[in-house]
Image (cartoon, rainbow, N blue to C red):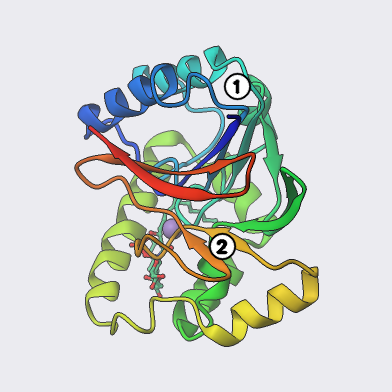
Amino acid sequence: MSVTLFISDLHLSPENPAMTDCFVRFLKREAANADGLYILGDLFEAWIGDDVQDDFTHTVTNALKSWPKPLYLMQGNRDFLMGEKFAQKVNATLLSDPTVIDLYGNSTLVSHGDLLCTDDVSYLRFRKIVHIKLLQKLFLYLPLSLRLKIAAKLRSKSSSHVKTLSPEIMDVTPRAVAEWLAQYGVSSIIHGHTHRPGIHFERKVLPAWHGRGGALVVNSAGSSELVYFD
Ligand code: LP5
Ligand code: MN
């Protein structure tokens, strides 16, 4: 039976080569016979521009480029600077967030998921600012060393900030989900970001890659399951 795979929140970085290896293995093994692969944001722990050229980036780029089937990328809240240049380099289609896809005849909305966390007001304010195109352009003009420093600072601020939030605030709100279902005329959403994997009635939530990899597998008969691998 044909299957399509969905993953997100891998948070790959040079500091965690084991997870990069896990991803490279996933492409060769679990993903080998899939019809298509959707990476719905936060492939990277932090992405500071498509112009970065280091061993880590080359490894991930080459692995993606060698995957022979249709590949779709979406930005997350950590790699929102991943752009068309990178997508072209790895022969992928860059999707905007959210996007309606045809999944074996079922219209399905795919998203990173952060936009559905509407109770996380300070994050949404932060998101609005870092999505200002001019600001992004200015950031990309900075030398790499300075970009790395700013990214590290933002990551550490964020890590301490999330410790102060209740788990409910960091989840999607039922209202935002209902609004999107109505607005896009779909009956199902696939998203990541919340790190609360599950298959709910109208929502499928992707796992984060913590210690092991995980993917949502949807088959051509319309059923889905979450699978995990080392
Ligand atoms: O990512 P995670 O899981 O820790 O938490 C997210 C939200 N945080 C973020 C921030 C990212 O982690 C930072 C990514 C850096 C990317 C590369 C740099 C590119 C810079 C480009 C500039 C144009 O997304 C977190 C949510 C949480 O998910 C749950 O949903 O709550 O949101 C926050 O933490 C919001 C805070 O309010 C943001 C704190 C940063 C404050 C910055 C001020 C100081 C900056 C100093 C810079 C020199
Ligand atoms: Mn995320």
Pointer 1 or 2: first along the chain: 1
Picture coordinates of residue 91, whole percent (x, y): 66, 21
135 relative to 58, above or below? below
Amino acid type of the residue that numbered disc 2 sits on in the rendered structure:
Val
- Quadrant in the rendering for residue 171: bottom left
Picture coordinates of residue 208, whole percent (x, y): 34, 51
Q: Which dot marks residue 130?
A: 2
Q: Secondary structure at mark 2?
A: helix
Q: How many marks?
A: 2
Distance from disc 1 to disc 2, alpha carbons, whole Å, reads 25 Å
Q: Is mark 2 within 8 Å of ligand 1?
A: yes
Picture coordinates of residue 43, whole percent (x, y): 44, 41
In the foreground, 229 or 23 = 229
43 relative to 159, above or below? above
In the foreground, 113 or 55 = 113
Residue drawn 29% across the image and 67% down it: 157
Q: Is residue 45 visible?
A: no
In the foreground, 75 or 46 = 75
The local crowd at label 1, few if under 14, some if 14 to 19, many if 20 or more residues have their Cα within 10 Å, is: some
Residue drawn 41% across the image and 41% down it: 44
Amino acid type of the residue that numbered disc 1 sits on in the rendered structure:
Val
Q: Secondary structure at mark 1?
A: loop
99 relative to 70, above or below? below
Split into 4 quadrants, where in the image is the C terminus? Answer: top left
Residue drawn 51% across the image and 21% down it: 64
117 relative to 149, above or below? below
Picture coordinates of residue 89, whole percent (x, y): 63, 20
**Residue of label 1:** 90
The local crowd at label 2, few if under 14, some if 14 to 19, many if 20 or more residues have their Cα within 10 Å, is: some
Q: Is residue 193 left or right of residue 16?
A: right
Q: Is residue 7 left or right of residue 103?
A: left
